[in-house]
Image (spheres, rainbow, N blue to C red):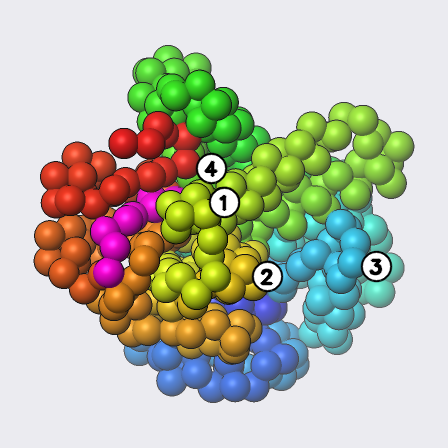
């Protein structure tokens, strides 16, 4: 099939390369010329395991190319919208300007019979409105909403082997035509028996925001339990293990620690609350405000804990921060809990050095006043405290004995409950973590 992908950020670039891998003829279109040039040279504009190899293979197959010219979408029959929907400045609501602009420019390339398939996370009601614009300007063209559930760090795997396909189809006779086109796009995924949910626009849009809200709630639930564990001396890891054995609850996404960040969960729960307010249903989602609050309190608690272990004052204390990205295996620093804590520590007078295996260039650009080091050892040299804030494997596998030789004080704060406490304590470190008793 001939496919266009509008917007070649995280979602779009991976989607475009994956669709070519599935055998389709794909053009990825973006207004950012430098991004398009990088992608066309098989260079990933972001860190994502497995993506560059997929990109090279797809380009080499001749089935994938990138362009800044929307006219190159003219040959395609299915057009995926993959542009970002960030939080509006100073408001909770989603900023839809990139979605609107993408649809507006796509109108020049659309033909009757074409399908626009939205993948971006949008407030419920957006698809129905855009469908009218599309059908009004290009009679016979259709719009469906086909949300994406990929996780950063697993983006390629999640796109090629999704755990479900959700189609939000237009009403009337267009539904069957749109469904057939999407089934053709995802033929091999459908043939593999992947569950499909075929529904309307509004439900498909809500599936995405509901899923991210549930995940955020699960994380904040366990972090609320961590607060109670801190007040009682109970242990949040054992608590999570024990409740997680109940398969109605499940152990996944019950990792207590510094909480969620990134370009999705925080802004999606806020946009969902804002949309509920517009719809007169704000009470239904007031609990998400508490989910957000619990999450933000963890960052403050982490700073307090650092102050506590540094004998009550951060002034002039050398603090090493391991991790800058919002999660491991990513260089994405959007709403990164690790950088938020690093900046707070610095504002309170600590001498902070941050390290990360992939995110330093991004972090340096956004937080130029922070000090960065290339390795954990360099960041921790002469440190009074070491904070593990993003659980990259390389930090989880640090040898506490050798690492202990570079610091001034062997104090480790495990912000992700990712280190083996016994090994670190056996090597002479004092170990503190969120939701766990002091040693
Ligand atoms: C999230 C969803 O998991 C994806 O399904 C969705 O497609 C994506 O948003 C999106 O909307 O595009 P992602 O932002 O890549 O994916 O990251 P997650 O793996 O969900 O992690 C989010 C944050 O929660 C990270 O900061 C992570 O450290 C934190 N987290 C995760 C915890 O604090 N505890 C956990 O148990 C799990």
Q: Is residue 222 visible?
A: no
The image position of residue 346, as x and y in percent, is 51, 64
Residue 82, numbered label: 2
- Callout 4–callout 3 Cβ contact below 8 Å: no
Snapshot quadrant of residue 108: bottom right
| Tag 1 secondary structure | helix
Between the C-alphas of marks 4 and 1, the distance is 42 Å
The image position of residue 22, as x and y in percent, is 37, 58
Mark toward the viewer: 4 or 3 = 4
The image position of residue 142, as x and y in percent, is 72, 54
Q: Residues within 10 Å of mark 1 (few under 14, many from 20)?
A: some
Residue under the image location 47 percent in, 37 percent down: 164
Residue under the image location 64 percent in, 38 percent down: 293
| Tag 4 secondary structure | loop
Magenta stretch, residue numbers: 408-415
Between the C-alphas of marks 3 and 2, the distance is 18 Å
Mark toward the viewer: 4 or 1 = 1
Which residue is tagged 4?
164
The image position of residue 398, as x and y in percent, is 18, 54
Which residue is tagged 3?
133
- The mark that comes first in sequence, 3 or 2, is 2
Mark toward the viewer: 3 or 2 = 2
- The mark that comes first in sequence, 4 or 2, is 2
Relative placement, left or right, of 191 versus 16 is left
- The mark that comes first in sequence, 2 or 1, is 2
């Amino acid at each position: 099939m001939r496919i266009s992908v509008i917007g070649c950020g995280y979602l779009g670039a991976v989607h475009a390369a994956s669709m070519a891998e599935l055998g389709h003829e794909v053009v990825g279109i973006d207004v950012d010329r430098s991004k398009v040039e990088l992608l066309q040279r098989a260079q990933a504009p972001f860190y994502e395991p497995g993506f560059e190899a997929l990109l090279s293979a797809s380009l080499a197959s001749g089935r994938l190319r990138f362009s800044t010219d929307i006219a190159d979408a003219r040959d395609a029959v299915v057009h995926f919208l993959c542009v970002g929907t960030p939080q509006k400045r100073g408001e909770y609501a989603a900023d839809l300007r990139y979605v609107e602009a993408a649809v507006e420019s796509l109108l020049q390339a659309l033909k009757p019979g074409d399908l626009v398939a939205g993948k971006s996370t949008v407030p419920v009601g957006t698809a129905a409105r855009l469908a009218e614009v599309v059908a009004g300007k290009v009679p016979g063209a259709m719009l469906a909403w086909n949300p994406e559930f990929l996780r950063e760090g697993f983006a390629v795997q999640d796109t090629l082997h999704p755990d479900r396909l959700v189609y939000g189809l237009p009403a009337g006779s267009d539904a069957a035509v749109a469904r057939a086109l999407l089934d053709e796009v995802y033929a091999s995924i459908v043939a593999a028996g992947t569950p499909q949910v075929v529904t309307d626009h509004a439900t498909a849009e809500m599936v995405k925001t509901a899923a991210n809200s549930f995940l955020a709630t699960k994380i904040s639930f366990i972090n609320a339990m961590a607060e109670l564990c801190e007040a009682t001396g109970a242990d949040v890891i054992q608590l999570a293990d024990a409740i997680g054995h109940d398969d109605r609850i499940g152990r996944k996404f019950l990792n207590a620690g510094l909480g969620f960040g990134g370009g999705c969960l925080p802004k999606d729960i806020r946009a969902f609350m804002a949309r509920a307010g517009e719809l007169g249903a704000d009470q239904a989602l007031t609990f998400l405000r508490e989910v957000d609050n619990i999450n933000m309190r963890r960052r403050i608690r982490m700073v307090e804990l650092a102050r506590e272990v540094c004998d009550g004052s951060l002034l002039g204390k050398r603090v090493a921060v391991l991790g800058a990205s919002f999660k491991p295996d990513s260089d994405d620093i959007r709403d990164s809990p690790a950088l938020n804590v690093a900046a707070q520590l610095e504002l309170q007078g600590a001498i902070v050095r941050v390290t990360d295996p992939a995110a330093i260039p991004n972090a340096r650009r956004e937080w130029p006043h922070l000090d960065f080091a290339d390795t954990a050892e360099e960041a921790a040299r002469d440190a009074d405290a070491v904070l593990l804030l993003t659980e990259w494997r390389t930090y989880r596998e640090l040898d506490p004995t050798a690492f202990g030789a570079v610091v001034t004080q062997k104090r480790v704060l495990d912000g992700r409950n990712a280190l083996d406490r016994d090994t670190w304590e056996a090597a002479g470190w004092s170990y503190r973590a969120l939701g766990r008793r002091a040693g």
